[in-house]
Amino acid sequence: MTEQNLNLVDEVKRRRTFAIISHPDAGKTTLTEKFLLYGGAIREAGSVKSRKSQKHAVSDWMEIEKQRGISVASSVLQFEYNNFCINILDTPGHQDFSEDTYRTLMAADSAVMVIDSAKGVEDQTKKLFHVCKMRGIPIFTFINKMDRQGKDPFELLEDIENVLGIRSCPVNWPIGSGKDFKGVFNRHKNQIELFDDGNHGQSIANSITGEVSDEKFNTLLGDALHNKLLEDIELLDIAGDNFDLEKILSGELTPVFFGSALTNFGVEPFLESFLEITPPPTPRSSNLGDIDPNSNNFSGFIFKIQANMDKNHRDRIAFLRICSGKFEKGMSVTHVQRNKKIKLSQPQQFVAQDRVIIDSAYPGDIIGIHDPGIFNIGDTLSEKQSNLQYTGIPQFAPEHFARISTKNALKRKQFVKGLTQLSEEGAIQIFKEPNFGMEELIVGVVGVLQFEVLEYRLKQEYGVDIIMNPLPYRYIRWIEHGSVKSDRISMPMDTILVEDKNRTQAVLLQNEWSIRHLVERNEGIVLKETSL
Ligand code: GDP
């Protein structure tokens, strides 16, 4: 093996690329910040510009985006910890929630699911979990806010299994809760780890560790807590599944950790175990079979395109997940979908809180490349194999729909062009009803903010004012081609048949009941929640 290749193998081995998924307010931002604190990327917690300032009314959003130019700083974070090179992918919550959030998960090798101990599994967590499950990536659970009175830990495990349908194995276990939360029992190391909240989580928490039977814990914990822990440890063997690495790696079993991101209790034990268990970049599937990250051909795919809100439109940043080979600044690569050579001259990486121009990057890393409007979601870039195409990123099911048309009939051309381009970019999905022309289309989105962005961008970038009428549909199911004769589909009441931009047929429905009804009325029909 050449020296260069050895370097590549070592760099791949120490990469960990993951997304943190949660329902808003469960503590994702706080946990991310604590990771940075432990990684030494920030000195004091609270110094990362609060994401709270980004939790704003929809109307402020455009202004903020405009002022910031491009809001990429918080999309990906890279930092080092114990010689691991970590890439965290941000999955926005609140109104920012969009199809982008799902697509970001396509670039992750694993996911950390943060759950609020008082609330258990919540809606948004469920949706994001579903996408991770579909990909079969490992999912780690961090049950947060143990410093507050929450649900019983055993109940929380049950909640995860019942609501999400995934088996769980606690790796550490909380000692006390609420005001009495003292630390965790690390089942891996078979030791107690107590923490000291000297300065309210601003800096790394000191810990005292030792065997369960160590007498000092009688005094440190008091009899009641110590005995409770001993009982829990006995119960644990029946409560969760056994630790099984293979099942964890295939996403069938989630290792569970308890802690409090705010006070740093349990954060470091979690980070250590997580980094040990979660895999480095693994081979990715493509039209040429699985591609080994250690191959000497640089390649990757685009999973997100961030539009600049600048009026000089179509000036954007494309986020590329590197899948194989070493990236070097100025490199010439083939943009496979267009079969064109392009030069990657000003690549950006997102380190801690800054964007910097980089010289090199490795599989697992995310780089931002300037996009003069040539890339689409899912495109492959490849240095040597010019016919390599990574398996595409699916269209995820929108949950909100509206019928839109242009206010001014003379602007019809720009209207169609704008919508087509924005849907190619992945900002929205468009659907056509069989008997309608292109001047009246149905737009589908995952998060309602996408509607506002659409309206804004059509006006700013294409000079088109639109009329938007919300529709009552909440579900879409794509019909597998050939599973039923397309002109014979029997539709339940209050549903409509549409075609997506690839002319694949789909049905828009108002409730789950209609989905069942559709299946009953059409023998053999195969419905899908995503479309490639
Ligand atoms: P996100 O919306 O998931 O990113 O959540 P944040 O990290 O912004 O946290 C939401 C709120 O919960 C903030 O007020 C945090 O200070 C608080 N919080 C986060 N972690 C903890 C924790 O471990 N304990 C307590 N008591 N509060 C926490």
Image (cartoon, grey):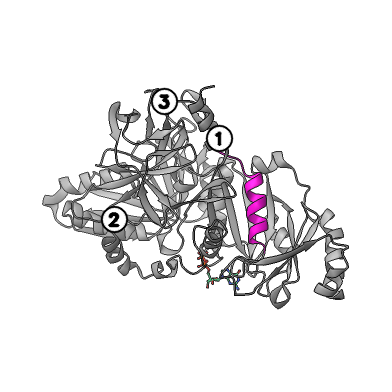
**Front position among marks 3 and 1:** 1
Return the disc, 3 or 1, that comes first in the chain's sequence. 1
77, above or below 265, in the image: above
Residue 433 spot, x, y in % from top left: 32, 45
Label 3 CB, ligand 1: below 8 Å? Answer: no
Residue 443 image offset from top left, x and y in percent: 33, 51
Task: Specify which label sits upstream in the sequence, 1 or 2.
Answer: 1
Query: Element type at marker 2?
Result: helix
Query: Residue at 21% of width from left, 44% of height from top?
Result: 417
- 251 displayed left or right of 402: right
Residue 293 in sight in this render:
no
Q: Is mark 2 within 8 Å of ligand 1?
A: no
Q: Name the residue under label 3.
A: 388
Q: Nearer the viewer, residue 41 or 398?
A: 41
Q: Is residue 526 above or below residue 409?
A: above
Most foreground residue, 117 or 402:
117
What is the span of residues highlighted in magenta in the rendered image?
266-283
Q: Mark 1 sits on what residue?
A: 10
- Identified by mark 1, the residue type is Asp
Ligand 1, by image quadrant, is bottom right
Residue tagged by mark 2? 454
How far is the residue under mark 3 from the one under mark 1?
Answer: 24 Å
Q: Do the residues labelled 3 and 1 touch (CB within 8 Å)?
A: no
Q: Which of 342 and 93 is in front in this view?
A: 342
